[in-house]
Amino acid sequence: MYETKKKYEEKQPPLVIKNATFITSAAKKEQFITPDKPMIAVCGKSNVGKSSFINMLANRKKLAKTSSEPGRTRLVNYFDFGEFILADLPGYGFARVSKGEKEKWAKTLDDFFKDKAKISHVFMLVDSRHDPTADDVQMIEYLHYHTLPFTVTLTKSDKLSRMKLNEHIRAIAADLYLAPANLIATSSETGYGKIEVLTKIKSVIDLANQPLPIDDAEETNTDEE
């Protein structure tokens, strides 16, 4: 709303995504992949704009399928982004599904996050226009409990004025017991916040690719024997 897409694209990104591709989908933990590079997960409620967020990062309009009907993402969808793997997780909190379907989604998420050694970072998406839902708060608590590194990323920021967006950032941060600086506001329509997200991803990749300390490496080798 307050800056054009062209202006954001003129900034030099710290990480260039050239050819993101779909890998596979998984309906249960036996189908989860073991990545050979850092894996970053994207989660959020079912209508928060996960597919649009992923397409923004990929510089492609149809890599992740978008839908006007919430709750369509029912699998873990894996994408190869070159220097990292992105896992698109099932959306939570959609009311118009059966209790059994909700339980199935919850189990898929739980199984995925339990194998946290494979996960380098989580981007948790929250709609910038609204207060966090009870499901959002529960997800934050879950990530804290399992000590998973995460960044809260606000979507659809172009729908708000600069002043209103800043107000919402402060309010959402307070609701989630986070500092406002820990939130990244984005818009898939304008590209707002994309540089900040890519900067975070680059730091995650650099950290994940650092060699293990000697003591940790020896312990890992001992466990494998």
Image: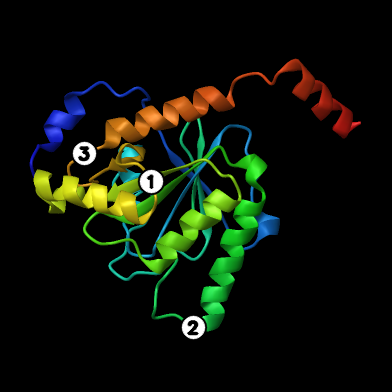
Identity of the residue furthest to the right in this view:
225
Quote the CA–CA distance across marks 3 and 1: 21 Å
Q: Residues within 10 Å of mark 1 (few under 14, many from 20)?
A: some
Residue at image coords 40%, 73%: 94
Q: What residue type is labelled 1?
A: Leu
Q: Spot the residue most to the bottom.
A: 98
Residue that numbered label 1 is attached to: 178
The answer to whether marks 2 and 3 mark residues whose Cβ atoms lie closer than 8 Å is no
Q: Which one is closest to the eye, mark 3 or mark 1?
A: 1
For the question of whether residue 89 can be seen, the reply is: no
Q: Which residue is drawn at 30% across and 24% down?
A: 13
**In-image side of 161 versus 122 (left or right):** left
SS type, badge 2: loop
Q: Position of residue 222 (x, y in %)?
A: 88, 28
Q: Residue 64 carries which label?
A: none
Residue 194 shows in the view: yes
Residue sitting nearer the eye, 101 or 140:
140
Which three-letter amino acid code belongs to the residue tagged 2? Ser
Tag 3 or tag 2, which sits nearer the N-term? 2
| Mark 1 or 2, nearer chain start | 2
- On the rendered structure, is 113 left or right of 168? right
